[in-house]
Image (cartoon, helix red, strand yellow):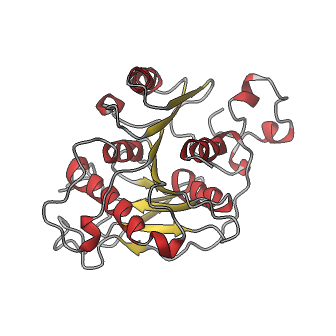
Amino acid sequence: MSTASILQKTCSAFLLPLAISAAELPQEILLWPNGAPGSEGKTGDEILTITSGGSHELSNIHKPSITPFLPVKGKATGCAVIVAPGGGHIKLCMDHEGYNVARWLSEHGIAAFVIKYRLAKETNSTYTVDDHALADMQRALRLVRARAAEWGIATNRIGVMGFSAGGEVAFLSAQPFVQTVTNAVDSVDRLPARPAFQALIYPGRAHRIEPTTNSPLVFLVCGYNDRPDISEGLASVYLKFKQLKVPAELHIYAGSGHGFGFRPPSTLNPQLLKNPPANGSNASRNGWRMAGF
């Protein structure tokens, strides 16, 4: 199956009803076992907040990591995705923009790795998006590539998927000017960090997306009711890719706003769960189980 077909199958998950079990999380893997460059002296623990709706949000990230969700060998496609949750660079929304997505991917043969990246806009943060969050994404891509044989992954089929602020981190990793490490700390740092594809789900600061003729193929998703820089901006981004003849696909969901992510049906309107829309209706075409519909 081609990378484009895998990406389309992957992102079609946003259109399907799904119930995800609350299984224990796999063991996370530190991106830098001896400490992340730029986080020297920062020893504070991560802060976990559970919202009134039961969602898990993380902040105070000083030890960036990936949590692997690996498919069983009989289902593995050889494709892998680094999943970057959003949260405005203040927090990470780990469930509907992270673990839920990764579980679905692994169940369908795609290795998924949920990244915890450093947060540039927390109060008193010394981190920046371009210097630290991006470095975390690049390191994740390199680390997965370094262990590709162990995990049954093809090194030319490792991509990124990001939501909101995580979408910004994802698309920055695909920009042409960020591919080298000047002060490599180990052999992993010397590996390529360019993703094979990018799935950008209502990405923040989309005006920064500047494709070139050799940019990775892109899958763009947002809601019609999102703020203009996203709901209108992604249409402009799509045209940039198309004009350069880079494979691109754009979906704008009517009735949806920002942050719908990938949620179990229990979080949705009970009436919709009892009577899902018939095929062919607006709601059916746009994924009736997305939050905010």
Q: Is residue 163 above or below residue 249?
A: below
What residue sits 30% from the left and 78% below the top?
33
| Residue 94, position as x, y percentages in the image | 50, 57
- Among the 4 quarters of the image, the one containing residue 136: bottom left
| Residue 143, position as x, y percentages in the image | 37, 68
In the displayed orientation, state which residue is furthest to the left.
183
Q: Which of 141 and 256 lies nearest the eye of the viewer?
A: 141
Residue 47 appears anywhere in the view: no
Q: Is residue 23 left or right of residue 184?
A: right
Q: Is residue 283 above or below residue 183?
A: above
Q: Is residue 242 above or below residue 134?
A: above
Q: Is residue 111 left or right of residue 159?
A: right
| Residue 186, position as x, y percentages in the image | 23, 74
Location of the C terminus (image quadrant) = top right
What residue sits 68% from the left and 39% below the top?
15
Q: Which of 292 and 233 lies nearest the eye of the viewer?
A: 233
Q: Is residue 228 above or below residue 14?
A: above
Figure label count = 0
What residue sits 61% from the left and 74% below the top?
24
| Residue 26, position as x, y percentages in the image | 55, 74
Q: Is residue 97 left or right of residue 124?
A: right
